[in-house]
Amino acid sequence: MIGRNQQLPDATDQQPARGARWWWIVAAVLVIVAVAVTASLLHTGTQAAPAAATSPAAGAAIKLAAGSPTCIDAWSGGPVGTYTFDFLNDEGDDLEVYLEDVKTRQVYLEVENFGGGATRQVTALLPPATYRWVCITSYTIKYSKPVVVTGAEPREQVHGVVPVTPLDLRIPINQYVAWVQSQLPTLAKQTQQLQTDLHAGDLAAAKRDWLAGHLTYETLGAAYGAFGAVNDAINADPPAAGAADAKFGGFRKIEAMLWAGRPAAAIAPYGDALVAAVGRLRAELIKPNAITPLAIGVRAHEILEDTLGRDLNGTGDAGSRTDLATVDANLTGTSHALAPLLPLLRKQDPYLTETQQWLTKTQQLVQSYHHRNGWVPLSSLTIAQRAQLNADVQQAVELLSHVAVITEPRNATR
């Protein structure tokens, strides 16, 4: 099952879908997401599903009270198609409701944490199967009698998701934290070298070593939330203009001053502060729940989502014109964020192979702009080249959105 209360990417900017359309269920108020094989998750919220799947109830919502001794007992199933359900929480406590395939334990509809007396409307495309409702509160879990949906498989292929629990994600989190920790000595050495360059007045070396350290930090993208305020001290975004004189610090401040031709003596204090901030990373990373079960899968998707909104439109650069180097580092960081999740994803993500292939293809494209004399500036690309680059990264973001949904931690139903 795929989703969370926060929004996943819209589909307004994505490439046309190719092949059959797929459906995934998502969490929260919403219920189901339409997914084209190459498109992102489309959040429906309380909207109706696409007209391609006809409602067996001709659009009429089925009213269900969740809270009977057997969870829900007012729906006995029906033909394959799109259903709209109006849920009432009659349990007297916060409630989570799943519609689960009895045989596979995959969830095809989810209503997340709605309070006593609250109502939610959800729409879901249901394939043929024997289902049961699962009602979960803080003190009980209830199951309905089996309900059967009959008929041929819908034209849109449908995938449920077996709930992944916080415990299932503990080993992947520990593995990822261990990898990040293994990168910190390199980052510390690179920033210390940058500091040495600045105090020695060697601006050419400082530019070279600035890039090396900055790219190492960019590969740690799934850990940024674990670093708290220290992240801003290391890699705060530059302002739209005047970054060399603006009051902020970190890699981008040093970048702005270096490429604006400021004297090394003026930049050196920012190098000192950067070294000190990097030195605090390990302590931040070992704090309890520095990376939460919810964050690990979401961030594997968000790294490139942020790349689209910042680096590929040039707003992340502060003068070095190394946007594409940053995109390359973000792609590397995405692969490292995915790595510990692969055992879970291999079981549930039908797009995993395509996702990995697309990430490789996209990184090869980005790296084709790295030559002996450095990285091609983003602004030097032709319109066609930028369109291709944007399309490839967008496609990767679409495919990665499934990771956030599959790995969202949920209550187990068994």
Image (cartoon, helix red, strand yellow):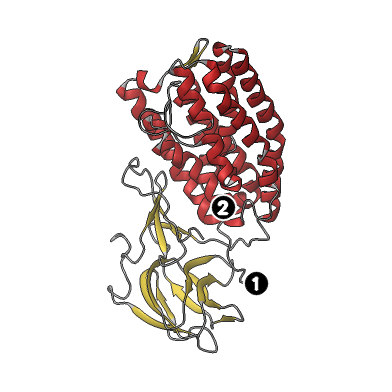
Residue 222 falls in image quadrant: top right
Residue 225 in picture, x, y percent from top left: 56, 47
Labels 2, 1: front one: 2
**Is the residue 315 above or below the residue 81 in the image?**
above
Q: Which disc is residue 295 wearing?
A: 2
Q: Considering depth in this image, is 5 or 34 the residue closer to the camera?
A: 5
Residue 26 in picture, x, y percent from top left: 46, 61
**Is the residue 176 above or below the residue 217 in the image?**
below
- The residue to which callout 1 is attached is 414
Q: Residues within 10 Å of mark 2 (few under 14, many from 20)?
A: many
**In this picture, residue 363 sits left or right of residue 276:** left
Residue 369 visible within the image: no
Residue 259 in picture, x, y percent from top left: 45, 18
Residue 56 visible within the image: yes
Q: Which disc is residue 189 wearing?
A: none
**Is the residue 225 above or below the residue 325 in the image?**
below
Q: Considering depth in this image, is 341 or 238 the residue closer to the camera?
A: 238
Say if mark 2 contacts mark 1, CB within 8 Å.
Answer: no
Q: Considering depth in this image, is 375 or 392 the residue closer to the camera?
A: 375
